[in-house]
Amino acid sequence: MPIATPEVYAEMLDRAKANEFAYPAINVTSSETLNAALRGFAEAESDGIIQISTGGAEFASGTKVKDMVTGAVALAEFAHVVAEKYPVNIALHTDHCPKDKLDGYVRPLVAISQERVDRGLNPLFQSHMWDGSAVPLDENLKIATELLDLAAKAKIILEIEVGVVGGEEDGVVAEINEKLYTTPEDYLKTVDALGAGEKGRYLVAATFGNVHGVYKPGNVKLRPEILKQGQEVVAEKLGLPAGSKPFDLVFHGGSGSLLEEIHEAVSYGVIKMNIDTDTQYAFTRPIAAHMFTNYDGVLKVDGEVGNKKAYDPRSYLKAAEQGMAARIAQACEHLKSSGRMIAG
C-alpha cells in the first residue's frame, strides 16, 4: 500500500485508541533497516510507524554529507516507493528533535510537506516530534503551539514530550530523577495551550519513569498509573465522561519494561511505542554471527583470498533484515494488549 495519507493515519490512531493497542514506532537509519521494518510489519500483518531521529537522518545522508534534512527526505522518498509493495499501512514520523535542531530539521521538513500539500499531494511525513523536555514547560508549550499550527496546515500530526525521558539517545543525556514523571499540572497546562484537537491533532509523550537505553526487565521503575491520572484530570476539565482518554499517548524509552507494564500503559491510552535499542540489536546480532562463523571468508587470512560470497554485504544484511523483522513482528504481538492491530 502507499504510505498512509493523513486520513488513513488518523484512522490508524483512532483504531488503536478504540481497541486498546499500540503501534510499534521503529527507528531506522538506512534503506536496509527501513526494509526490515516494512518486512516486520508485513509479516505481523500489522500497520505501523517508521521513524527517523535527527542522528539517524544525518547518518542516512552519508557520513561525508551529514545533513539531517537530506537524509530524512531520502529515506522518506525511498519508503514512499518501496512501501507500495507491502500489504500494510505505514506512517512516517520524525523522532526526538530538540530546540537547537528545530530550524535544521523539523521546520524545513514541515515546509517541504506544506509545498507538497499546496500542489495537491500528501505530506512527505505524517507526523513530527518536537522534544521540548530540556526547556521549561511554558517555553515547551509556546513552541509546541507554533509548531501545531504549522503542522495542522500541512496535514501533519505533531508529537510533543511533556516530562523527561531518562538515559541517552542520539547523544542527549537526561538524568534519572523525579522529572521522569509528568504531573497532573503538566497535563492541564498542555491542554490549556494546545487544546483538545480543535487546533490540530497532537500526540503526547508523557513520562512515567521511562528511560532510553539498555536495561534488563525490572530495572526501570515505571509508574503507568501516572498516565491514567493525566487522562482523568484532563477528562474532568473538559467535562468528558469518566473513563475517557482525551490524550493520544506515546511510550518512549521502553527497553527494560515488563510486558504487564506495557499492557497497562496501553490500556490508559498509549497508541504508539517507540522501539530502537531492541531492533538495533536484532539487526546487528546476525551480522556478528556471520562474521564469527565465516571468519576466514570475510578476511584474507594468512595471504589467502577470502570468500567473496561471505564478504558480499548481501550475504549478511539479508540475515540482519530477517532478524530485525522478526523482532518487530514480536513487538506487534506484545502491543496488541486487549485489542487487535491487524492492518486496516
Image: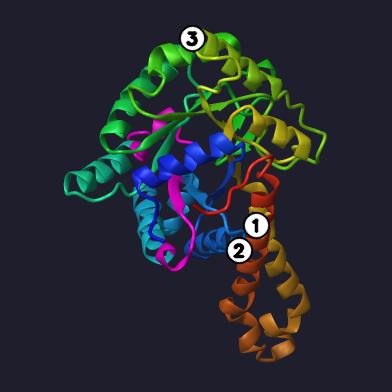
Q: Are marks 2 and 1 in contact (CB under 8 Å)?
A: yes
Q: Are marks 3 and 1 in contact (CB under 8 Å)?
A: no
The question of residue 316 being in magenta is answered with: no
Rounded to the nearest angstrom, the CA distance separating label 3 from label 1 is 39 Å
In the image, the segment drawn in magenta is: 83-106
Whether residue 332 appears in this view of the structure is: yes
Q: Which element carries disc 1, helix, strand or loop? A: helix
Residue nearest the viewer, comparing 171 with 74: 74
Relative horizontal placement of residue 266, taking residue 235 as reference (left or right):
right
Instruction: Determine which of the numbered discs, if any, sits on residue 85 in the image.
Output: none
Label 2, on which residue? Answer: 43
Q: Which element carries disc 2, helix, strand or loop? A: helix
Q: Are marks 2 and 3 in contact (CB under 8 Å)?
A: no
Instruction: Determine which of the numbered discs, if any, sits on residue 239 in the image.
Output: 3
| Residue mark closest to the camera, 3 vs 1 | 3
Give, as a three-letter code, the residue at label 2: Glu
Label 1, on which residue? Answer: 329
